[in-house]
Image (cartoon, grey):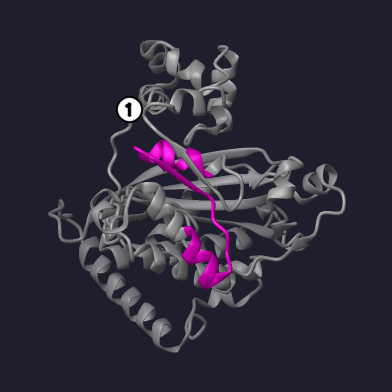
Amino acid sequence: MAVCGSTEERHGIILAKSWEAKQMGVKTGMARWQAERLCPGIILVPPRYNEYIKYSKLVRSIYDRYTDQVEPYGIDECWLDVTGSRYLFGSGLEIATKIKESIKKELDLTVSMGVSFNKIFAKFGSDVNTPDNIRIIGRDNFREEIWNNPVSDLIFVGRATTKKLNGYGIRTVGNLAKASPLFLKKILGKNGLVLWKYANGLDTSPVNSCEYVYPAKSISHGTTMTSDITDIEDIRRIILFLSQTIGRHLHQLGLGASSVKIDIRDKDLNWCSFQTSLSFYTQSYLHISNACLDLFMEKYRFTSGIRSISIGVFKLKGTDEPFQLSLFPEDKREEKLIQLDKTVFEIRKRFGKDSIKPLALLDNTKLPSAITSGLPHPISR
């Protein structure tokens, strides 16, 4: 079986799959029809986001009993550093066993766990493990455990990187580990050196505590529409809707942005991206929306219907940091817009997300029900 998004709203991709479906070749992110072709008779169920959040929090509460160094990786994965807990609870394997048994007993869930001396190999052990099991990868056996696996099994080696490495005969993690660092840097840039260190067990990145907040470098938000759009008014509404979410996130983080970007995918899945700089830092979703719309109008030419749109902001700076003032009245206007946004966000917080909205968004925006229900969140990187 697998969890699959709504086909009617054009989100019909696999979000999670059972071990049996995985053995048949079903992968996360695969289209529904592909999964049904690989695994005839597969049982598909809709996602229940709130339940996912609920159980993820319950599982994390069990982690917290053993260490305060719990670093989330996505919604259902975490790294735990138990170095300081060994005198209380035993070795890494013993702690992993206790956690697994607690989750099974209290929540009736199974977990796949990897135990290792660094984050990369712990993640690897969890990913390639069998269900409801623990895999140990130590300093003395990681070559035997890992090097014969496909290079794509290593974290941060995506589809494009895998294709490039395979083109140079680097097909396994061992091939990557034995490759020349200078050659990898030449074909992959700095990321090539990082991956070489990962493959050789040289990762030293710490597991951050649960209170640690990663500094955001960019914030983006996007959606696939329920049907292809060709009307500029629909484009304007969608950009306005996405901008509101980004603006709220900027307010929550106390950040301003001085650059915007827009990514567009048409009905034939052709993709293009444009970006531009603003002359000032802003938190206002109206400024962000107008800048993205201007960018779209200037750069994009309709040749077919648009399937999905994503917008983002980058070059972020804290609102308490000094910045260059303008000789013109934009600064005062910006302050008023920020206050207006804060008031709108407070009203929505108290009375619900639909209690106040721009008039343009009262019409059908062709947005899927999931995004209008407030479930997805902008992505900070």
* Figure quadrant of the N terminus: bottom right
Query: Which stretch did the figure color magenta?
Result: 100-126
Q: Is 48 placed above or below 296 here?
A: below
Q: Identify the residue shown where x is 77% and y is 51%.
A: 32
Q: Is residue 289 visible?
A: no
Circle 1: residue type: Leu
Between 32 and 26, the one lying in front of the other is 26
Residue hosting label 1: 202
Q: Position of residue 327 (x, y in %)?
A: 16, 55
Between 256 and 240, the one lying in front of the other is 256
Between 17 and 260, the one lying in front of the other is 17
Q: Position of residue 226 (x, y in %)?
A: 71, 61
Q: Is 135 placed above or below 70 here?
A: above
Asked if residue 359 lies left or right of residue 38, the reply is: left
Q: Identify the residue shown where x is 57% and y is 59%.
A: 110
Between 80 and 317, the one lying in front of the other is 80
Q: In terms of secondary structure, where does tag 1 sit?
A: loop
Q: Identify the residue shown where x is 36% and y is 25%.
A: 197
